[in-house]
Image (spheres, rainbow, N blue to C red):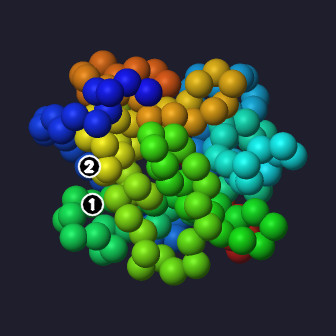
Amino acid sequence: MSDDCFQDKTKPSHTVTLSSGDRFHVMSLISQQADSLLEIVNILGDNGPSFKCTGMYDEAASLVNMVDSTQFSTNPKKSVSFTMNLKGASYYLSLSDGDVVAKALKDVSKLTDRERFVRLIHGPFSMFESVAHRDCFLGSYQDGSLHLINVDDKLFPDPRTLFLMHLKLINRPPK
């Protein structure tokens, strides 16, 4: 990750917040075809659970809960946090030394700016700007790994930072 991600830059942006508790499939445009959903995995030999864009589209386990995290910070910027379940435990997508990590949080009021992202709309896509690092966006590499990626021009963003979101309709009563 470049040092540009840690410099404060001020640019106007348009934000949209989501309803708390909405569950989505979040799909990277860059990850390998047919396996690009955001998911939480625990691969033997890793340092515990991690978020990756490697999930198959039909997996209900790849549903991401979007939590409105605006209320948990002194920073009034509208933000969302990502949470997913793995083996009965909830994990938040977080940042540690510029890396994207899975962090177990039992108390949602303990969310910090490292777990908060501002959702920006770019055509049919969503971008997620880190609250902790201005102009740095959640992005996926082709291998599905997640990183913060510096975006200097939000009108022409790096395609690695673009995600499709699909509201998954689960357990809805038939019409």
Q: Residue 140: give x, y in percent of width and height.
A: 56, 30
Q: Nearer the viewer, residue 172 or 35?
A: 35
Nearer the camera: disc 1 or disc 2 = 1
Query: Looking at numbered disc 2 in the image, what kind of residue is underneath it?
Result: Thr
* Residue where numbered disc 2 is placed: 15
Q: Quadrant of the C terminus?
A: bottom right
Q: Can residue 83 be seen by looking at this rendering?
A: yes
Asked where in the image residue 28 lies, by quadrant, the reply is top right
Q: Residue 117, relative to residue 107: is it above or below?
A: above
Q: Residue at the spot x=75%, y=32% of the render?
A: 35
Q: Residue at the spot x=65%, y=69% of the render?
A: 90
Image marks 1 and 2: residues in contact by CB distance under 8 Å: yes
Dot 1 or dot 2, earlier in sequence: 2
Q: Residue 175, relative to residue 18: is it above or below?
A: below
In the visual, does 159 lie left or right of 73?
right
Q: Can residue 125 be seen by looking at this rendering?
A: no
Asked where in the image residue 156 lies, by quadrant, the reply is top left
* Residue where numbered disc 1 is placed: 78
Q: Nearer the viewer, residue 44 or 93?
A: 44
Secondary structure, mark 2, is loop
Asked where in the image residue 123 lies, by quadrant, the reply is top left
Query: Looking at numbered disc 1 in the image, what kind of residue is underneath it?
Result: Lys
Q: Residue 168: give x, y in percent of width and height.
A: 64, 56
